[in-house]
Amino acid sequence: MSASVSTLPGLDPAALPLRSAPAAPGHFDELFGATTPAAPTAPTTPAATDGPDAADAATAPPARSLNPAWARFFAYLGKDDLARSNDNLQRQLRDNGVTYNVYADASAGLQRPWALDLLPLIVSPQDWAQIEAGVRQRARLLDAMMADLYGPRTLLQRALLPAALVQGHPGYLRPMLDVRPPGDTWLPIVALDLAHGPDGRWSVVGQRTQAPSGLGYLLENRIAVSRQFPHAFAGMKVQRLAASYRALMEGLQRRLPEGENARIALLTPGPYNETYFEHAYLARYLGLTLVEGSDLTVRDQRLYLKTLQGLEPVHALIKRLDDEWLDPLELRADSTLGVPGLLQVLRAGNLLMANMPGSAPLESSALLGFLPAISEHLLGEPLRLPSLATWWCGEEAALREVLPLLPTSVIRPTYPNTRMDTVMGRSLDERALNEWAGRIARHPEDYTVQAWLPLSQTPTWTPDGLVPRSAILRVFALADGPQSWRVLPGGLVRLAPRGELVAAMQRGGSSADCWVLTDGAVDRTTMLNPATGVPTQAQPKRPVTSRAAENLFWLGRYTERAESSVRMAQIMLRQLSGDEPGARPLVAWLSALARENALVLPDVPGAEQSPRVFTRSLIAALAPAPGTPLAEQSYSVGFNLRALKSAAAQVRERLSQEHWNLIKRTEGDFARDCAALSGNAEYATAEALVALQNASELLAAITGAQTDRMVRDSGWRLLSIGRHIERLVTLARALMLGLEQRSLQDIDGFEAMVALFDSTITFHARYQQRRDMAALLDLLVLDRDNPRSLAWVLHSLRARLLRLAENTSPADTALALALPQPETWQLATLAQPGSERNFGALHTLLADCIGAAGTLSDEITRLHFSHADRPSQSLEI
């Protein structure tokens, strides 16, 4: 089949698997490889320029044939079911948990699934040769500009750049003046946004140098889409991506004295950033440590990673947050995302950063108009890739020239953080145009005007046919050595949503893969070492950062706390929903247990006073309605599940996708089930029990994922320690309350206590109908084979701490030895009722367990999470 396909000159549009509309008039049509002629009857309106309605209404010239590359693509597809392929693609994205936060979409919540179209954008070898040469030149030019702006500043002295665009830009960082980065390379990662114009030429419409996004998403796009079309992907000789990523990592290592032994980390703002999935994905792919600012600290002008083993040096940092947040000491004082003293480390030459801070002025669209002259000055050559015609209104001549052009131009802010969106002049009426002209005349330096370029339109799949949508291609230049860049053969395609002119993910757009074709051999380099079969950049031992360790610790605690609160609520509802009220000691114990564990608000009457009010309050508190003030919430099941999800989100990169999906499903399903109970809490006991049972089953699955599907490293041991600390406190305190309320003297109270310890089946199998304290304490306190007994919990805690001490701090051994010793406990002593059946020895034992758990939690925090006992950082500013 491949032989016949390779000779295809084209394919009749009638042979397409689905009906296709042409691109809008005046736009380059990627599918047909030509520009759609302008409509003869009426001029193109703003709504028709990029909108699908106009595209649907337009009529394709009858003689047009498909672009040869697209003809080959569809010939490889044959009779493939595109609907099924699209379903498979979307399912894969959901299974992989690919997400993106769209701020403009208020209904999407924190995250929404990543939007990816089934069909790729196809770039010919001839077009790619032009793009590759131009992008590599732009990377050299932008890096040379950075070196000049923070060094000799000849561009300003010779008026090749207005000082207002540089020194007046809030992103120009004077603390970086006269700094020289390792290898004299300022920008190891450069991203350019390219548009395919009506003349068939590619133009630069924007550049990103601070923390360009897309390197992770385009990888996921490539994997997902190529799996749907494996024959076309192989037969069309699509260039692969791995060699560029490998070259980036090897280039960073070559510029570091430590070489292959250098520790390289990826700095992320955290899980609430819109592209956090990409940060975690890219860190895993490149074998990097994913860190947040709180994971790092500065000591003696060097950067260190806070780990369970102590402070470990960091030699290079790939940053994924904008410069202003990097260092609260010298930049934004309110930043909690950066590292105090980080710029000092850079000035001392002790850190390689990709990219170096201070490049924000290069991202201003106003600079595009000055680049041709700057390229001649710095590189001695003209630009290979043109930029959109751009005018900075701060120059009087440019202002006079551009004001009459506003109806056919695009108005952009010159500086960031102005809260101004891009304005399309074609969408403004005469009054609005006059208002904008007035604003620009009053503050000309704040505005930049660009010529409007009709974006090319690429086919996208819909159930009704192929629909053209406007596209922007983001291409990356990656440094493979000092002052050397290679262009990643592909990119991130952003598609404009229906009815929109701007192809932006933040506006709810979608993405597509980019297939760059080659006439030569396909580079099949991978990130795996051919000799060992493991990632070339894999670190010999994955460090556990203190932040990750703390979140894993609390992930364990909240998992156990959620399970306990579910079980308590089930016991309470079952005991209080019967026809006959329970014995007063049992009801008093349930009330005390509910208050102790915040299952009801403090001012709710006890169950012994008003069982109905107590039950209604218990059900209402299971999951407070969204927007309920924190002071009016109880820390019940819903709260614990949200806290569990929050802790898990902080260490998502350490959890399997199935584990994360279970956590999200448990919290979401329980919130939905409880929302159905609102307004009917008085008669919803049965429905509440169903919701609790569903949550209990899902929590059991989460426990299984934590027990059987996580690597047994120090982080997992802290998760397990957190669970056991929580279990020890909860069970010991529940048993103590039972003794104080004397609920164990009643058969229902006795059974409720055994149920709370999740030991009902074992108890009855072993002791049949016995209901005495000796049997109870033997199973719930002393039994070393019962994972719910206090002795088993203490034994497991000691074992985890001793194993933790082997890899972290010897102080963990002391913590293990300080725990109560179940080997010294005697059943005869504990079961001795004493005066008034107060079981004094047992009460003392339970108090010791509770106190030991609290002390252990505090000491673990001091030793492993806070690093407060480390020497203070050295700052010389």
Image: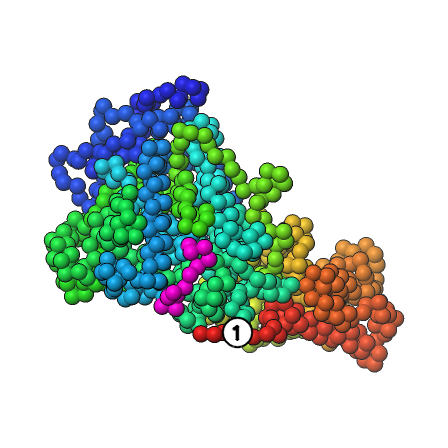
**Left or right of 516: which side holds 169?**
left
Q: Position of residue 645 (x, y in %)?
A: 54, 58
Extreme residue toward the right, this view: 828
Residue for point 30% across, 34% down: 30
Residue 760 sits inside the magenta stretch: no
Q: Which quadrant would the C terminus be assigned to in this image?
A: bottom left
Can you identify the residue that label 1 sits on?
Answer: 874
Q: Is residue 670 visible?
A: no
The crowding category of the residue bearing disc 1, from other C-alpha atoms within 10 Å (few below 14, some 14 to 19, many at least 20), is few
Task: Examine the rendered structure and indicate whether residue 446 appears above or below residue 86.
Answer: below
Tell me the SS state at disc 1.
loop
**As displayed, is residue 243 above or below residue 707?**
above
In-front residue for pair 130/234: 130
Q: Which quarter shows the N terminus?
A: top left
Residue at 63%, 53% in the rendered image: 541
> Residue 20, located in which quarter of the rendered image?
top left
Q: Is residue 135 above or below residue 396?
A: above
Q: Residue at x 26, y 45 (%)?
A: 382
Q: Residue furthest bottom?
A: 835
Q: The disc labelled 1 sits on which kind of residue?
A: Ser
Magenta extent? 174-185
Q: Nearer the viewer, residue 344 or 503?
A: 344
Q: Is residue 224 left or right of residue 258?
A: left
**Residue 409 visible to an observer of this rendering:** yes
**Where does residue 587 sit, x and y in percent of width and height?**
67, 71
* Residue 872 placement: quadrant: bottom right
> Camera-side residue: 580 or 127?
127
